[in-house]
Image (cartoon, rainbow, N blue to C red):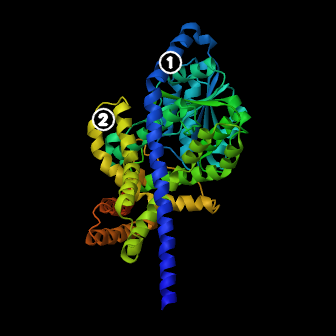
Amino acid sequence: MSHFFNLNELLLQFLFVLYVIAGAGLVAYGFNCYHSIFLFLKNSRRVRISDRKVLLQFHRVTPRDQLPKVTTQLPVFNEANCVERLIDTICAMDYPSHLHEIQVLDDSTDECIDVSRRKVAEMQAKGHNIKLLYRTNRKDYKAGALAEGLLKAEGEYIAIFDADFVPSPDFLLLTVPYMVMDPGVGLVQGRWGHLNRNESGLTLAQSIGIDGHFVIEQSARSWGNLFMNFNGTAGIWRRQAIEDAGGWEGDTLTEDMDLSYRSQLAGWKMKFVFDVIVPAELPSDINSFKAQQFRWAKGSIQTAMKLLPRIFKADIPLRTKLHSFMHTTHYMIHPFMLLTAVLSFPLLKWGANLEITGIKFIVSFAFIFLAAIAPSVLYFVAQQSSGYKGWQIRLLAMPVLMSLGVGIAVNNTRAVFSALTGFKGAFIRTPKKGNKSLSMYSQGFPFLAVIEMVVGAYCVMGLLQYIDHRKFLVGPFLALYAVGFLAVGVLSFMHYQFNLSEMRAMKAAELKQ
């Protein structure tokens, strides 16, 4: 019997160690948010004033006919909803047409390729230098399309836009000058805006999260002389920077982060321009959002596994190495969240002797609390500094964002382990609505939602256990976990059923015709 109790105690000790590791990880990533806020506030005014001076100087001394040649690449795959709007927008850019080549890189397997052909022919007839490059295979997915397009590109600079982005006519005039004026800049990244921010609570919460990434994190990395990533769209590359990095590679799902890190290791600088905002479509369906998050999470960890050894060996400052580690492994917060949620119940129920009391408890709780609210502080500062009107009202969506950030942990933990185990899997793009219904995109049954709801119910049990033990300080965290997992799981089923009903209605209407 004593042997059994020893094993039981060893197991509890092991679970406690896992819990501490997960908690320490969350604290580390949380305090990294505070450092990003510090770098943003420290450099914001200085850099933005300097950027405006660069633009004024460039356009004062550079005639339009002496602007450099730019190739704009538009990678498209089965996006008939958006491709016409995209091509119209790019062709309307305020840049000399003889200096602006447009490549539509269409790998589509549905009617989108026919839409692209018609639209490209229409714009060619209007005098635009636009070409359609159609691949019959999807080798390396988006990275492969961009690489093949680069081989035929005419421009010294390469702008890239995904199908759901709508850049302003002056985008090139607001980004090219930074590369011309500073030959060390390999990439200029614009800030993402939002076409459908107010469509629902889901899109509003996403917009706050994305604003946090661009307004604070990308600004902090760029202005703090740290490594930053290309966001895959709404940016412009120096062709030489791509080639010096070894070109586009398709061995990760985040080819944009991979290339930007390799380019910076090759000595090129990445510049983020705060005041160039390019609006785009946010996923309005929770399952589309989860697919997007899965790809980003898995790709980030793949990039970390691929490049961190090179980064740690590189002759760069230690602070850059540490921030690169925190950046590329950021999605580890989701396995850590899931661990703390799952381990809380058994440690409380059977591990009474593991309790931390007195001053140790106060210090531990203070660190955990400060780390837990760090993302919310970052989002608050981002909204306040974004330049958008009505930011105070948008903060009412913060509870939705917090629940979403927690509830997505099962989905993203699966993505992290998929990357760590080397499982390849298929490239799953994020469906874009454009001006049409999302129901035209088939979605599989959301099996993961069952797990999310089970985890949510389990967290409710843990919450009740904590309340029964009068652990009121820990209770709010478990309450957030319970709400987050249950909300994401239930919403996944609701959106799946709604889209399924819409698709059936569309098919019925087609049969009647």
Image height of 370 relative to 318, above or below: below
Residue at the spot x=54%, y=59% of the render?
415
- Above or below residue 133? Residue 97 is above
Amino acid type, mark 2: Trp
- Numbered badge on residue 50: 1
Q: Mark 2 points at which residue?
A: 391
How many residues crowd around disc 2 within 10 Å: few (fewer than 14), some, or many (20 or more)?
A: some
**Rendered-image quadrant of the C terminus:** bottom left
Q: Residue 292 carries which label?
A: none
Asked if residue 290 can be seen in this view, the reply is yes
Q: What element carries label 1?
A: helix
Q: Is residue 356 above or below residue 129?
A: below
- Compare residues 188 and 479 and report the one nearer the observer: 479
Kind of element beneath mark 2: helix
Residue at the location (67% across, 50% down)? 306
**Distance from Cα at disc 2 to Cα at disc 1:** 26 Å
Choose between 109 and 363: the one closer to the eye.
Answer: 363
Amino acid bearing label 1: Ser
